[in-house]
Amino acid sequence: MTCAVIRGVGAGIGFRLQAYGMRLGVPLLRRRRLGRGLRYLVVPVNYWRSLEYRLALDAGRFGPGDRVLDVGSPKLLSLWIAERLGSDVVATDIESYFIDEYELLRRTRRVPAERLRLEVEDGRKLSYEDGAFDKVYSLSVLEHIPDEGDTECVRELARVLAPGGLCVLTVPFWPTSRIDWRDPDFYWSGASVDGEGGRVFYQRRYSAVDLHERLIEPSGLRLARLGFVGDRFSVGANRELCELLPPVTGPLQPALARLLTTGPAEDWHTLRKPLCALVVLEKPGS
């Protein structure tokens, strides 16, 4: 993977997605969904999402007629792919929190119901038939599945992927294996596992070994691309640059992400502070 490829695609996509997200805030405000509407107007695409969206759109090469499955990713991208790229998208999550809002936005954007389906699914045991999708993607999701659930999920993604299809994943990266525990204040905390002191499993940060042993090899798919991105500048062993950005930078975060994060590198050792891995897998043709 080369930096030029991703940067070339992202040059226009990032700002178009930001403007698109801002427009989604208007119908929510009209229906008195003030919190969500203001969120889209002020921070339509946050710092790391803008990077992940660009990576996924470049790697996935989504197009008209593609059968696409999203497992747990932010739903703005699913709506964009369905409306702007013409793919038939099934957008899923383990909880139903997103369905009402995105049904409203789908109708507002006049996206046909058959173009964007919103469903509750557990990525570890998907209800779809073998080979049902041409493309599958899951952005910053697998790391949140406790125990061996990330491996179970990637096997399911491989099962529902058609021969010749692509699977696009992003996960947090760390030079060594790391698990983060957190207070149960996030929407899927009920599906997580308990730790000590009332905290629950929040996420795994994958090492290079973890990527291969937990995701790539168990999938049974061919590794088509593996890349790493991170902060251009280090602000401490356990800090990220985006943590220092005040809320007023919300509208500027996609632009700041382009300035403050690296281009993708094949070798994470070449980066000052690698934080995210892009994994692109391909199912061999029949």
Image (tube, rainbow, N blue to C red):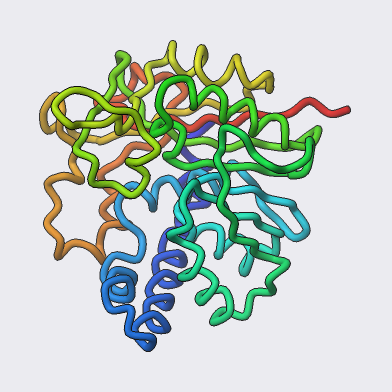
Where is 159 relative to 57, above or below? above
Residue 210 relative to residue 80: left or right: left
Residue 26 figure quarter: bottom left
Q: Residue furthest right?
A: 286
The number of callouts visible is: 0
Picture quadrant of residue 84: bottom right
The structure residue drawn at horizontal position 40% and vertical position 31%, both measured from the top left corner, is: 143
Question: In this view of the protein, which residue sits in the foreground, 155 or 256?
Answer: 155
Residue at screen point 46% across, 46% down: 7
Place of residue 113 in the rendered image (x, y in percent of width and height, measured from the top left):
68, 71
| Whole-percent x, y for residue 40 in the image | 34, 70
Vertical comparison of 4 with 38: above or below: above
The reply, left or right, for residue 52 in relation to residue 129 is left
Looking at the picture, tell me which residue is in the foreground, 237 or 152. 152
**Residue 172 image position (x, y, % from top left):** 36, 31
Q: Residue at x 57, y 19 (%)?
A: 216
Which quadrant holds the N terminus?
Answer: top right
